[in-house]
């Protein structure tokens, strides 16, 4: 018998230790050493968001949003759930001990070994074993899987990495929230400035409209000129209502991010005009690996998937399980606590290895291997995306600086042309169309200048986010 058991054990071990195909690992492509040849390691992403933003009203909004925003609250709950997964995986490494209270009833067939042996056999105090035999037990039951091959340890490591991934996921939510809130706030300020320009333009157009009506009465202009000036004035007045609606919608979007019902957003309407976007330092690309939450999240997901593969690989090997119990057992409740006669215990150690169900285990291993490669590709993709975002924002900021300078000069020239055209119109040296064109071109240039400056503010916000700033 011993030789049969020994032979079986050898077969199980050899079958379980069959070599597995290793998971293919692709080399991670190296990042460029710099952006456009700049090797300065100073990085704006290291600044806390309260240091990066200078508008006290925006800082107050962000503070409120970080406390109340629903997405942030959901992210914190994901962290709690992942933390529970870590505790669960740690518990799997320790013996499981349960308190047990059990009651049962058994009847053995007469033509069985137990039934024939029990008949006429004394069980207690001159009484034979009853045909219907009760069974009561109170005590402790234990089960423990000895982690010979590191399966449970790798499952714990995977749970820890996924917990760290959820922390980075929360940081990513915070970064995106701050970025979206700041962008909406700067858009609101630009709309305020746009509305101010439109109101000023309406005043100029009303003045020009009155002049052309006077000139018509003096036979210096005709009805067509009056109607053209009136139509231009009505068009600008209609634009004012459109901008007012956009302001209301932008305020609602900000209130939603702050998790409150619509209300006026407190802001300094002079901030947009009196301030310029902050200057940023991009540092070196390698710093993205430490600063960007999405890259760190992808890195932890990759580490977790590697641990999953190791755990799935260990499932092919024999597992050692120890089970046992100790307590009091008797066929009558009154006899349960009579020691030592009612004391019962058992202990069993088993070494088992999969034979028939290896296909399911292999499928799980293949799934884990495929997910590991997915995590690896996603990690590489996230790194590339981070670099490209910073690269594009650097170029966008440079281009917007040049566009803003040119638009400023254009706006100044066209603003001067309005007064010149009106003066020439009064003296009869210019017709009404030239005045209209001057007004149209001037308001277009002013609105484009505001749009360009808004895009500069948005580019700095996007750059700060792309560098990995905002979550600290």
Image: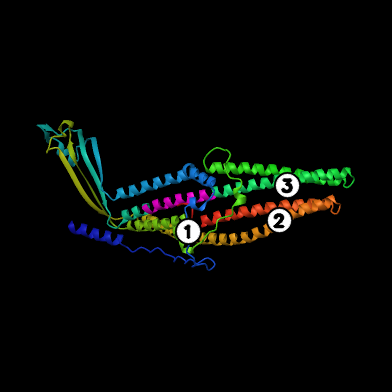
Q: Earlier in the sequence, mark 2 or mark 3?
A: 3
Quadrant of the rendered structure where residue 226 is? top right
Residues tagged 1 and 2 counted as in contact (Cβ below 8 A): no
- Which of the marked residues, 3 or 1, is nearer the chain's N terminus? 3
Q: Is residue 176 above or below residue 106?
A: below
Q: Nearer the viewer, mark 3 or mark 1?
A: 3
Q: Quadrant of the N terminus?
A: bottom left
Disc 2 to disc 3: CB gap under 8 Å: no
Crowding around mark 1 (Cα neighbors within 10 Å: few <14, some 14 to 19, many 20+) is some
Q: Residue at x 65, y 52 (%)?
A: 450
Q: Which mark is residue 412?
A: 2
- Please report the bounds of the magenta region as a residue range: 160-180
Evaluate whether residue 65 shows in this view: yes
Q: Which one is in front, 422 or 436?
A: 422
- Which residue corresponds to the image point at 42% horizontal and 50% vertical from the top-left? 167
Q: Residue at x 77, y 52 (%)?
A: 419
Question: Which numbered dot is residue 378?
Answer: 1
Q: How many marks?
A: 3
Tell me the quarter of the picture where residue 19 sits: bottom left
Within the magenta stretch, is there residue 165?
Answer: yes
């Amino acid at each position: 018998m011993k030789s049969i058991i020994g032979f079986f054990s050898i077969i199980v071990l050899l079958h379980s230790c069959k070599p597995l195909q290793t998971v293919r690992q692709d080399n991670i492509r190296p990042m460029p050493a710099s952006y456009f040849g700049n090797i300065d390691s100073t990085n704006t992403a290291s600044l806390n968001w309260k240091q990066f933003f200078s508008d006290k009203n925006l800082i107050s909004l962000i503070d409120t949003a970080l406390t109340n925003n629903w997405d942030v609250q959901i992210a914190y709950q994901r962290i709690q759930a992942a933390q529970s997964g870590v505790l669960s995986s740690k518990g799997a490494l320790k013996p499981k001990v349960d308190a047990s209270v059990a009651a049962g009833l058994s009847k053995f067939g007469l033509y069985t070994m137990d039934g024939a042996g029990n008949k006429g056999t004394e069980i207690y105090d001159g009484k034979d074993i009853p045909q219907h035999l009760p069974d009561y037990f109170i005590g402790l039951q234990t089960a423990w899987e000895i982690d010979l091959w590191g399966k449970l340890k790798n499952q714990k490591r995977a749970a820890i990495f996924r917990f760290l991934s959820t922390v980075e996921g929360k940081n990513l939510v915070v970064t995106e929230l701050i970025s979206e809130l700041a962008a909406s706030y700067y858009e609101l300020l630009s709309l305020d400035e746009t509305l101010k320009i439109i109101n000023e333009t309406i005043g100029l157009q009303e003045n020009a409209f009155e002049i052309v009506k006077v000139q018509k009465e003096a036979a210096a202009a005709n009805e067509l000129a009056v109607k053209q000036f009136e139509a231009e004035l009505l068009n600008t007045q209609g634009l004012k209502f459109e901008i007012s609606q956009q302001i209301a919608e932008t305020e609602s979007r900000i209130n939603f991010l702050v998790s409150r019902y619509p209300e006026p957003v407190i802001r300094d309407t002079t901030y947009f005009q009196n301030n310029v976007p902050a200057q940023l330092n991009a540092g070196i690309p390698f710093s993205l690996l430490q600063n960007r939450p999405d890259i760190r999240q992808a890195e932890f997901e990759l580490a977790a998937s590697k641990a999953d593969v190791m755990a799935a690989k260990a499932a092919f090997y024999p597992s050692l399980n120890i089970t046992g119990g100790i307590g009091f057992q008797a066929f009558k409740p009154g006899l349960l606590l009579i020691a030592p006669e009612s004391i019962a215990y058992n202990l069993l150690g088993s070494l088992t290895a999969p034979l028939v169900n290896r296909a399911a285990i292999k499928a799980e291993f293949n799934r884990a291997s495929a997910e590991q490669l997915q995590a690896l590709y996603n990690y590489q993709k996230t790194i590339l995306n981070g670099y490209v975002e910073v690269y594009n924002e650097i170029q966008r900021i440079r281009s917007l600086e040049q566009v803003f300078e040119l638009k400023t000069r254009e706006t100044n020239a066209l603003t001067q042309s309005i007064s010149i055209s009106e003066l020439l119109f009064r003296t009869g040296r210019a017709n009404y169309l030239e005045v209209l064109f001057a007004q149209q071109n001037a308001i277009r240039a002013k609105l484009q200048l505001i749009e360009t400056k808004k895009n500069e503010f948005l580019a700095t916000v996007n750059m700060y986010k792309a560098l990995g700033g905002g979550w600290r």
